[in-house]
Amino acid sequence: MIGLLGRKIGMTHKFGEDGKFIPVSVLEVGPCFVLQSKDKSLQLAFGKANPKRVKRPLIGLFKKAGVEPQVFIKEVKIDNAKDYKPGQELKVDVFKEGDFVDVTGVSIGKGFCGGMKRWHWAGGPKTHGHTSHRRVGSIGSSTTPGRVFKGKHMPGHMGHKTVTTQNLKVVKIDNQNNVLAVKGAVAGPKNGYLIIRKAKKKK
């Protein structure tokens, strides 16, 4: 189950052979470079970086692998990791049209949000005399249980979480430009970094 690193270019659409409208996410996938080959994982790097902005320990890692400094570094699990060597280049051609992929990214951050936006609370009464329209209100009982249960829905930081969208169908591949188009949406903003893996099972 190979995986590559990439970034989200944006969304567009295409029409299928039956004329149906298909929403499509366009991803730049690779070229990725192998930094280290471990027992059951590969350490991959993607996206050219400004050498002046790379920390010294990472510069040594890149020199050892014979790779120019890259921005995005992640480990991808793979059974036959020993078949790959440091410095090896991996491109989008590991995928083909009709494959199903799992795409992992960091969702768009929304900042601090109230409970109505974050958890879709109904809110309090809106009629005359009421003042608790969007407030939290009571969050627990009295003597029993005498505490607030863990995981209680409350206002707080919304978004900016790692999200994996599974079983997205590959509808088009441009090997020359390392571009992959998948059916549906993936997590993250434009130019957000992603991990793209072959799905274990098809829908």
Image (cartoon, rainbow, N blue to C red):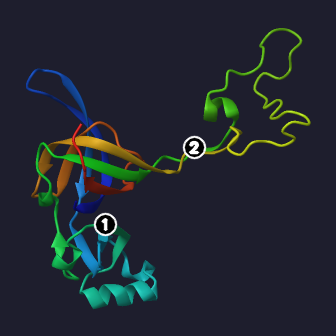
Count how many numbered circles sit on residues in the image. 2
Neighbours of disc 2 within 10 Å: few (<14), some (14-19), many (20+): few
Neighbours of disc 1 within 10 Å: few (<14), some (14-19), many (20+): some
Q: Which residue is mark 2?
A: 110
Residue type for callout 2: Lys
The answer to whether residue 61 is left or right of residue 176 is right
Please tell me whether mark 1 sits on a helix, a strand or a loop: strand
Residue found at x 16% / y 77%? 83
Spot the residue most to the top: 128
Residue 122 in picture, x, y percent from top left? 68, 21
| Residue nearer the viewer, 39 or 32 | 39
| Residue nearer the viewer, 151 or 92 | 151
Q: Is residue 87 above or below residue 190?
A: below
Residue found at x 21% / y 81%? 87
| Residue nearer the viewer, 41 or 171 | 41
| Residue nearer the viewer, 170 or 140 | 140
Residue 73 in picture, x, y percent from top left? 37, 71
